[in-house]
Amino acid sequence: MAISNHLREFHGLPAFDFPAAETAESKAELPEPAAVAWRISVDSYEAEEEWEAAFARFAESVDTTEVRALIVGSWSDVYDTGPDEVISALVAARDRLPALRALFLGDITFMECEISWINQGLVTPLLDAFPELREFGVRGGQELRFPAVRHARLRSLTIETGGLDAEVVRSVGASDFPELEHLDLWLGTSWYGANAQVSDLAPILAGARLPRLRSLALRNSEIQDEIAVALSGAPVVAGLETLDLSMGTLGDEGAEALLGGQPLSHLKQLDLHHNYLGEAMRERLLDTLGAAGVEIDLSDNTEADRESDGVEHRYTAVAE
């Protein structure tokens, strides 16, 4: 699976593409500033306009004091360069965006740049510059830096990658997010830079630094069974309403650990789509947790590839 579509909505608002320079509409034809999540993008290769110039046009055309959500799409030469200039432009405009509550960096499809080829960089200055943010997301793990940070208001953090470096995982766990309710990490595969072990997730699994967490997604991982085993006794689970272990390599071993560990019947949702579960295990999950009222997603069940010597291969949903 590749990411083939841009975000259709963000922060509860429909996404709207700010017009490119050559097709720019008049100010009267633009939506109300607070009514949409504004996506600002340029061509990912040989762009005629730099992202910062498109953002400057946006700031001239829209009352930015009312903008609630921004989506950063592709910047110029995203294959080769990170968003340093994009981040600098946004930080410089912080006083002009007092109502900003949601920011997504890197809404880029595979036609523009494969997820594991997206160059990122140091993204936490955006959290520092916008202390009133409630939602922050970033796509792309190459050169991604996310040192431990404190943010008093953030409620949702999403990091989407085909391979997430362990240092980022540890830094998220060391961060101080007292209001965080939703955490979504796409851990990825070692082929594209994933090197985190379950031990790197320990602060997240302990839950002590995330007192309000209600939704946890540790997905798109090649160590999904090991994560499931760790979650079977992790303190963070008791406070969750939603647990998402989808898009990875989850097999019967991981599912057995979930069923044999601490009770999960308090969950509202358990997302296990894109899995490698046997039919008997899927039935057990439905007969136990499903019967207890947990909404379970077991869709996109996949069979592992087997070599002639019996070696089994499983794949994450999103890698390259």
Image (cartoon, rainbow, N blue to C red):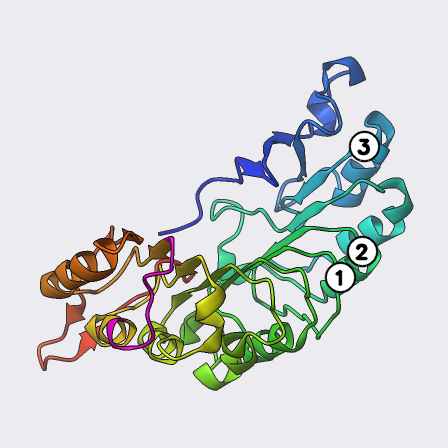
Farthest top residue in view: 28
Cα separation between marks 1 and 2 = 7 Å
| SS assignment at label 3 | helix
Percent x, y of residue 59 = 84, 34
Q: Is residue 7 above or below residue 309?
A: above
Is most of the magenta stretch helix, strand or loop?
A: loop
The residue under label 1 is 152
Q: Amino acid at mark 2?
A: Pro
| Displayed quadrant of residue 17 | top right
Q: Nearer the viewer, residue 247 or 207?
A: 207
Residue that badge 2 annotates? 131
Residue with the mark numbered 3: 66
Q: Position of residue 200 (x, y in %)?
A: 52, 82
What segment carries the magenta color? 259-268
Q: Earlier in the sequence, mark 3 or mark 1?
A: 3
Instruction: Identify the amino acid type marked 3.
Output: Glu
Percent coordinates x, y for residue 230 in the rendering = 39, 80
**Mark 1 near mark 2, Cβ–Cβ under 8 Å?**
yes
Q: Amino acid at mark 1?
A: Ala
Q: Is residue 170 left or right of residue 254?
A: right
Identify the residue at image location x=49%, y=76%. Answer: 205
Whether residue 286 appears in magenta in the rendering, the answer is: no
Q: Residue at x 13, y 59 (%)?
A: 283
State the image quarter where residue 72 is shown. top right
